[in-house]
Amino acid sequence: MSEMVLEFHSIIFSYPSGEREVLSDLNLGVPNGGIMTILGPNGAGKTTLLHIALGWLKPGSGQVHLDGRPLSTYSRREIGQWIGLVPQIEHIPFDYSVLDYILFGRTPYLRPLEMPSEKDFEIAQQALKRVGLVHLADHSVTNLSGGERQMVLIARALAQQPRILLLDEPTSHLDINNKGRMVKLLRQLSLEGVTILFSTHEPDVAAAIAKQAVLMRDGKILKAGMIADVITDQDLSNCYQTPVRVVEIEKRYVVLWN
Amino acid sequence: MITLALSLLVGRYPGLVILSPENLSQDILAQRLLLNLRLPRLLTALLLGMSLSAAGTVFQMIFGNPLVEPGFLGVSQGAAFGAAFSIIFLGNIAWFVQGTAIFFSFLGLVFSYSLARKAQYGGWVLRLVLSGIAVSALFSAGLGVLKYVADPLRELPEITFWMLGGLWSLTWRGFLSILPACLIGLYIIYRMRWRLNMLSLSDETAFSLGIAPTRERIILLISATAITAAVVSVSGMVGWVGLIVPHLARRVFGADSRFALPGSMIIGGWFTVVCDDLARTILAGEIPLGILTSLIGATIFIVLMTTNRLKVKR
């Protein structure tokens, strides 16, 4: 296994409808077992980058390597077993029970016409336990609070037993208690060897979870490196084009803005 | 099963309502009636209900929209236009009407689909829904023209009656002509029912679960359209089954289409058989099936919407 589990080589990407390049000549490596955060203003290309890592969007030029092999040589099922995605918002039109929904995470392990087995069911239950919502197993997903819903999305991705977890703003509508639980959960997953790549708008959350950080702006990487080197007054101010100050209190970074 | 057996005996021959089994063993006319008229009609009603509700479930899940019904991609309006066209210009021959109805419903789908591919804005689902609406509108405008030029004494009543839906002229030949398409379509949909769940989620989530969203949607769309077009071509427009039965099934069996889809097929088949029994029994003349399915379907739906919980444990 190579040192970098996910590598982006000179990725250029633009959406078919727009002329603007969303990502321009982007190079990045995500270390195996690492936790990396992507920071940057709205429209910097964070979500696009996650979708390219998943193989859902194909880069106009450049290549993505997963575990040393071009991503395009993987089958959809293989990618599904490797990578889990937790989208920022998930619109669920029908009122599935929470456990039904988490069971969907087992799909990459099933043959095209196969139904989930008893064992898949158990894995789904473990995933639900993992996020601490066993009591909600039979509840409808449409009736959950924002925090519960976010945890259920993660449980669905965990049922996939992925080696890489991509999360798009996992804490964006969580209260501070739920944020704390999310931080703990992601750290724990990383200890178990899951590689985590997530985008966020909250530098403090980024600093609390991640070891590495990437600053993006206008489809380019401004700076990438260890969190302490990247979460600095100068780099954050530069990235968001607004004065930012970083203070350290009780070994934690707090970011002051405006 | 009981409903099916009973349905064979219910009707207006020889006396009102029930044909007794003893009577049946002696009366040759009754036997003929049973085998050649009621049995194919019953099986078609069953197939009609199962197909419309299965297709309805597929469409609602694929478009993530509970208000969609199987004919909306120009399929129903296409079939209606085709039937009217055939009634007026090609002579009113049963199998010809059926053929043109199928032809035009597929034309509707192809037209909607290629329009959706060419459309310049919006996501895939939005483009397809809008194209479906536009194509349906074109066909119903065409239908309006046809109705306007139709002979008000001979052709217009025929068109109107077709639009209301019914199975009165059905024979074994009609049943057998739609059976293969329906069986294949239903089989594909039934086997893909677990993946149907994932297709109701957003595209990138479906993709992250190892699904090929566009390709698998197309397979299911074609299957669902094929069975809808097939049954509509013999029955005319039978409303509400494809819209309401999937809701009932989700209400009873839960949203997971592993259970909701077969549930929907069972409820749909049963419901249509009962409605058809009523259609040919209540009055001396036929009541168009489409009217009954709408009337009874909507009533049941209102009752279910207002009752609290109805769910089977599995």
Image (cartoon, coloured by chain):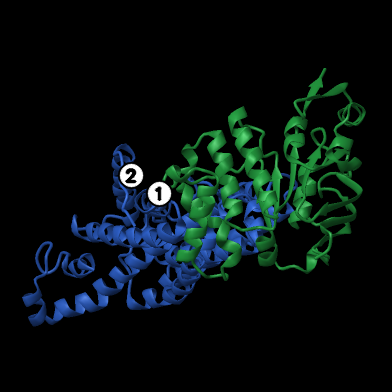
Are discs 2 and 1 both within one chain?
Answer: yes
Chain for disc number 2:
B
Chain for disc number 1:
B
Count all numbered tags in the image, as a single digit. Answer: 2
> Residue at 40% of width from left, 67% of height from top?
B234
B11 on left or right of A28? left
Give how far across and how far down residue A146 sits, in percent: 56, 34
> Residue at 34% of width from left, 40% of height from top?
B305
Colour assignment, chain A: green
B287 on left or right of B233? left
B306 on left or right of A203? left
Q: Which residue is mark 2?
A: B301
Chain letter for the part of the structure drawn in blue: B
> Residue at 75% of width from left, 36% of height from top?
A206
Q: Are marks 2 and 1 in contact (CB under 8 Å)?
A: yes
Q: CA distance from mark 2 to mark 1?
A: 9 Å
Give how far across and how far down residue B97 sits, in percent: 46, 67
Q: Which residue is mark 1?
A: B247
The N terminus of chain A lies in quadrant: bottom right
Foreground pick, B308 / A221 = A221
The C terminus of chain A lies in quadrant: top right
Q: Secondary structure under badge 1?
A: helix
Residue type at the position of mark 2: Phe
Quick check: B3 above or below A159? below
